[in-house]
Amino acid sequence: MEMKRILSGIKPTGAPHLGNYFGMMRPCIALQEQGEAFYFIADYHALTTVRDAADLRAHTRGVALDFLACGLDPARAVLFRQSDVPEHTELAWILSCVTPMPMLENCHAYKDHVAKDRTPNHGLFAYPVLMAADILLYDSNVVPVGRDQKQHVEVTRDLASLMNRLYAKSAPIFTVPEASILPNVATVIGLDGQKMSKSYNNTIPLFEDEKPLRKKIMGIVTDSTPVESPKDPAGSTIVALYRLFASDAEVAKLEEDFRAGGTGYGDFKKRLFDALWEFFRPMREKRAALAADPGHVEKVLHDGAQRARAVAVRTMERVRAAVGLR
Ligand code: AMP
């Protein structure tokens, strides 16, 4: 059977958080065993919002460190920085030239922006096209994404089919990918009960220092039920987050203690903090070891870029020939 190509990306717009870990990093790490995986740090995408060069560099390094600490094996998966492979932007332009405007006007990230009366920049509007280029450059078969990205993978599929219809002579130019919406990956909620997202300022970063992390957990929004009263575990942010780290039996015990009354939210938050802190302990130790060797991350990204570029350049030769650029 042919080896599957798996591709996914993460934006270096801040420290990776629990939503990124459970929604993307952990499933990607599991998938590295099952095919040829390409995982990239989407710094071109981050440019739609990040305006500080030093921040972008620091976040890019941070994402790489976090991913490696969590178990990404660079000997198996190719980890690279998107901008080290400029073919991403070249292909995005070529795809742009066949992309109908209404296809992008229908995309929810853009529509959300407009609904909030914000003026989107062209990069944000066109970002599904760059994402299509990211995927198609590597002839990816499988694109593991959270539910929030399903629509963008549909755009990729449409653009791949359109390009094949317009330009393919004997063999198709692009592989039409599958969006694999990951089973068992629910949207992780943030400190305020909304979806955890860097843009909502409600995230729990994976590797924050103990004190600020504890403070964040203690700041989880709850109702004002008094200590002695029974509390409803359904809809509780504390319970939802605890479920990410605890066994079924531990969750059942927490829910029972909620219903029994006599324990305040502060104590439940401490329990959550302890579970989270223990869960990431081995990864935190690994991260510290990796960070102590400053050249390591750069070397991984450099090697990754070379491996990624070798594939991307070949795809672009095919695309350039098909559209008449040489
Ligand atoms: P981003 O930071 O937008 O590049 O997101 C990287 C990946 O993390 C994407 O595949 C998202 O689907 C996933 N992700 C981000 N936030 C969450 C969340 N709150 N719950 C689950 N997955 C998420």
Image (cartoon, rainbow, N blue to C red):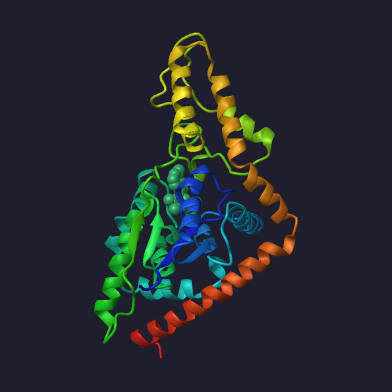
> Quadrant location of the C terminus?
bottom left
Q: Nearer the viewer, residue 68 or 319?
A: 68
Q: How many marks can you see?
A: 0
Q: Visible in this render: residue 99?
A: no
| Residue drawn at (46%, 28%) of the image | 249
Relative to 319, 168 lies left or right: left
Outermost residue toward the top in this view: 228
- At a point 34% along the width and 84% down the height, the residue shown is 323
- Residue drawn at (48%, 36%), measured in percent from left and top? 190
Relative to residue 59, is residue 263 drawn left or right? left
Residue 118 image position (x, y, % from top left): 42, 47
Query: In screen coordinates, is 174 left or right of 241?
Result: left
Q: Which residue lies furthest to the bottom in this view?
A: 326
Looking at the image, is 238 positioned above or below residue 204? Answer: above
Residue 53 percent location from the top left of the image: 64, 59
Q: Position of residue 309 (x, y in %)?
A: 53, 76
Residue 128, image quadrant? bottom left
Query: Toward which corner of the image does residue 298 lie, by quadrant?
Result: bottom right
- Give x and y (percent) for residue 155: 31, 62
Q: Which residue lies furthest to the left in this view?
A: 165
Residue nearest the observer in this picture, 80 or 287: 287
Q: Quadrant of residue 105?
A: bottom left
Is residue 13 something one can see in this rendering?
Answer: yes
218, above or below 299, in the image? above
Viewport quadrant of the N terminus: bottom left
| Camera-side residue of 315 and 12 | 315
